[in-house]
């Protein structure tokens, strides 16, 4: 089965870098019934950048607004899924490199059942070109 690559929305907020803050944020969305395709957080300038990749952006935005969570504007991330194998990500990174597209960040993991998943970020000005290189329909 071939890899699937899709472009999807992501949003982020800056939150205090304190114990329990991630759980507090996720509880807001859990209580609103918001499901995530991915979630990531990391320290940044004495705070934490918290990235959300919602399954339903409209429901996510409504829940964030109701909870008064300040989000940065919508951006695009590539969600990659496939059968785990040696070099699974190398070919994707090589194609982007050959097209002179710099990868800002990538997080990749394997899962049970011989599968892998990854989030891949490029500069927003290069999303359309990266989509073309990766064979992702970017819509209108």
Image (spheres, rainbow, N blue to C red):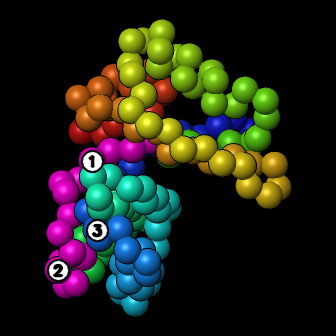
Residue bearing the label numbered 3: 15
- In which quarter of the view is residue 24 placed? bottom left
Q: Of discs 2 and 1, which sits in the foreground? A: 2
| C-alpha separation, residue under disc 2 versus residue under disc 1 | 19 Å
Q: Of discs 1 and 3, which sits in the foreground? A: 3
Q: Which mark is residue 68?
A: 2
- Name the residue rendered at 29%, 70% in the picture: 16
Q: Is residue 33 shown to the viewer in this render?
A: no
Q: Of discs 3 and 2, which sits in the foreground? A: 3
- Report the magenta residues as a range: 64-78
User: Of helix, strand and loop, which one carries label 3?
Assistant: strand
Residue 35, percent from left and from top = 46, 73
- Name the residue rendered at 19%, 84% in the picture: 66
Left of 135 or right of it: where is 29?
A: left
Q: Is residue 44 above or below residue 37?
A: above
Residue bearing the label numbered 1: 75
Q: Is residue 23 above or below residue 88?
A: below
Residue 116 is a magenta residue: no
């Amino acid at each position: 089965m071939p890899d699937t690559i899709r472009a999807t929305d992501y949003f982020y907020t800056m939150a205090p870098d304190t114990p329990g803050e991630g759980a507090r944020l996720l509880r807001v969305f859990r209580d609103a019934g918001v499901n995530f395709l991915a979630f990531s957080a990391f320290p940044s300038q004495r705070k934490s950048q918290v990235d959300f990749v919602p399954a339903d952006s409209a429901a996510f935005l409504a829940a964030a607004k109701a909870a008064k969570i300040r989000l940065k504007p919508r951006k695009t991330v590539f969600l990659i899924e496939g059968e785990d194998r040696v070099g699974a990500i190398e070919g994707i990174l090589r194609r982007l490199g050959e097209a002179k597209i710099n990868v800002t960040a990538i997080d990749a993991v394997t899962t049970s059942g011989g599968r892998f998943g990854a989030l891949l970020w490029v500069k927003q000005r290069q999303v359309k070109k990266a989509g073309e290189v990766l064979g992702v329909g970017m819509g209108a």
